[in-house]
Amino acid sequence: MVFVVELCIVVVLAVFIQLLLLWGYRSRFRSSDAASSGLPTVDGAVFALVGLLLAFTFSGSQSRLEHRRETVLHEANAISTAYSRVDLLPELQAQMVRKKFKVYIDKREAAKNSLPNIDLAETYWSQSHVFGSALWKSALAATEDSVEARRLLLPALNEMFDRGMDREVATRSHMPPIVAALLFVLTGLAALLAGRAMAGSSREMSRTHRWTLAIVFSLVLTTLLDLEYPRLGFIQVREADQAMDTAIQPILDFERKSEALSK
């Protein structure tokens, strides 16, 4: 399914760029040589701007992708650390805190599994904030009589909540729409000018060169979209998700066994 969608995007963009190339090619023959003087300077400026914008956009998208992966790993480590410190509490208080902990983790896991549906993930994140507040209050009450447990557990919980918020912000962060619009407009303009340049060098437009340019442009733009919106295309964050599952699954399994034994 992902391959079909990606292929459709590439084809649509390639056809659109082909039309712009042909438009530029044919418009050159309708203009006089005098009207065409000085155009190579304009062409070079536009092509340079497109290359510069693509370079900066790819760099920003790659940085955001790596940051998303890092936030998932950091949250996984923070969850594992905070849960392990619950053992510092007396058994009765620890059981109460673990129950709140499990509900919080369930919501975080549900949010992860709901992506790339960002609206559904937002719902689970909001619910996790509510249960996180309940977990914090439960931890405060449970550590009233233990200075050592309070000193170790509460900072770990605070770190876990902070890392969770970092992950949410990173997931929401994308290329500014104005930059994306400018990139597509400049790419289209570059294709139009490339068509005019081809008309100036030959009376017959090379189909091979035309399709090569269109496919390269479309592949570059599609890859950029994949980088900006991982999980929707071929680019994923599976390694970070596996780290999160590794940290969370033993906790969930332990809590399910505890619930089964208590029944």
Image: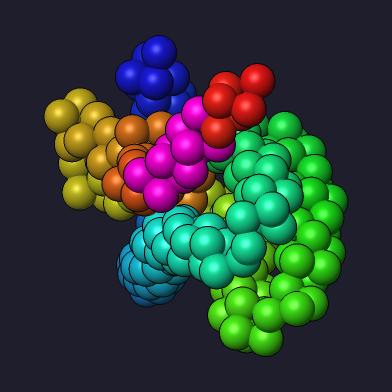
Horizontal and vertical percent for residue 258? 55, 33
Q: Residue at x 56, y 25 (%)?
A: 261
Q: Is residue 136 above or below residue 172?
A: below
Q: Is residue 61 above or below residue 124?
A: below
Quadrant of the image occupied by residue 8? top left
The answer, for residue 262, to whether it is visible in the render is yes
Horizontal and vertical percent for residue 115? 57, 35
Which one is nearer the viewer's eye here, 257 or 65?
257
Q: Residue at x 39, y 21 (%)?
A: 2
Left or right: residue 155 compared with residue 19: right
Q: Residue 247 magenta-drawn?
A: yes
Q: Which residues are magenta?
A: 246-257
Quadrant of the image occupied by residue 172? bottom right
- Colour mode of the rendering: rainbow
Q: Is residue 133 above or below residue 12?
A: below
Q: Quadrant of the N terminus?
A: top left
Q: Residue 81 magenta-drawn?
A: no
Q: Residue at x 79, y 60 (%)?
A: 138
Which one is nearer the viewer's eye here, 147 or 168?
147
Left or right: residue 132 compared with residue 37: right
Number of marks drawn? 0
